[in-house]
Image (cartoon, rainbow, N blue to C red):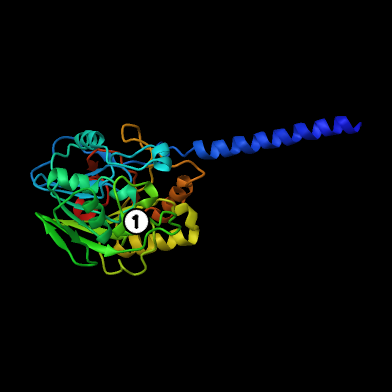
Amino acid sequence: MGRGLLKRRLGRIALACVGLALSGLIAAFTLRPSPEAYPTLAARAGPPTPGQLTVRFLGTSTMAFDDGQDVVLIDGYLSRPGVVALLTRPLRPDQAAIVRHLKQADTRRISALYVAHTHFDHALNSASLAKAYGAALYGADTMAAIAAAEGVTAPVHRLASDQPSTVGAFQITPFRTPHAPGDVAAGATAADFRIPARARAYPEGDAHSFLITHGTCRILIVPSAGHPGDVFHNVRADVVMLGVGNLSRQGPEAVAAYWRDTVAATGARLVVPIHWDDFSRSLDEPLKPFPYAIDRFDQTMKQLTALAGDHVALRLPRAFEPMDWSGLPAGGCA
C-alpha cells in the first residue's frame, strides 16, 4: 500500500472517529429517559370536600398545598427561563408566565411561601409571588437579600431548624439539611446580590427540608438530595416528596443511605420524586427528565424502585394535577 493511500485511509478513519464522538456527545445532551416508563399519581376526580388537602406539583420542587382556606407554597420557580437564557443572560421573573401557570394550578391565593434554599430554580419567582399575593415569605438570609433586591418591603421570616410555624390548619416545620453534593453555582454574597442576576449568581444559602402537617396527614418535603444524617430519625411521615436531582451521580451506596435516612427513617409508605424534571423547559411543555449527559434519572428510578420493593409505593407526580393517593398506602393523607 502506498504512503499516500495509507494517509488517506487514516484520515478517513480519524474523521469517522470524530463523527462518532460528536454523534455520541450530541445524543448524550439530547436523548433522555421517558417519564412514561414509571408509575404516576392519578389526578383526583371531582372538587375537594371542604377542608380537604389538595397537593399539586408545579415542577422542580415547587408545590402548592391548598385546603380551601389557605395555600402554602414550597419554593417559587414558575417562569423557567430556557437553557440559552440560563447560560448567557441575567434573569428576571416573567410575570406573565407566573400568572399563567398559577392559573393552570387553580391557585388564586398564596398564604405563605417557604423557600428551601436560594438557587434560581427555587427562588427566582419567590419574592415576586410573595409581593403579588401578599404571602408571608419564609427563608434564609439570602432570601431576604433577594427579596430586598426585588423591592419587597415586607419582612422575610427566617427559618429556624425544628421550629414550626402555623398557617391556618397547616403546621410547617423546617429542618436544616444539606444541599446535594457537587454544587457548581456558589453565587454572589447576599450583600452583593442585584436584580437582574445570572443563574450562577443566585446564592445557595442555608438549605432546608419541610414537614407539613395538616390534620392527620404528615408530608415530608426533601427538595435536595443531600444526605440528611439522622435529622429525620425522630420524624414520622406518611408521604415523602423526595428530591432526586443528580442523585444518580452519587453512586448506589449513597442512594441507599439517602433512602434509609429519609423514607425508611420516617416510616413513609408513599414516595413522590421531585426535582427530577429539566428546569430549563417551560411549564407550557410536558415535564421531561434531564438528558443523559446531565443526570441518569433512569438509573435513579431503577434503584429507588428496588429499594421501595412491595412495602412503599413510588409514584411520579403530574404537573398541575391534584394528587390522588386515596388508593395508596399514604396513612393519614389517604
Tell me if residue 43 comes above or below residue 61 in the rendering: above
Q: Residue at x 42, y 41 (%)?
A: 88
Residue type of the residue flagged with mark 1:
Pro
Mark 1: few/some/many CA within 10 Å (<14, 14-19, 20+) = many
In percent of width and height, residue 177 lies at 33, 63
| Image location of residue 193, percent across then percent down | 30, 54
Residue found farthest to the right: 1
The residue depicted at 47 percent of the width and 52 percent of the height is: 248
Residue 269, x across and y down, in percent:
30, 55
Q: Quadrant of the N terminus?
A: top right
Residue hosting label 1: 203
Q: State left or right for residue 322 relative to residue 86.
A: left
- Write down the quadrant of residue 77 in the picture: top left
Residue drawn at x 61%, y 36% is: 22
**Is residue 54 in sight in this rendering?**
no
**Taking the image as drawn, is residue 327 in sight?**
yes
Element type at marker 1?
A: loop
**116 sits left or right of 245 in the view:** left
Q: How many circles with numbers are drawn on the protein?
A: 1
Residue 191 occupies quadrant: bottom left
Q: Residue at x 45, y 50 (%)?
A: 300
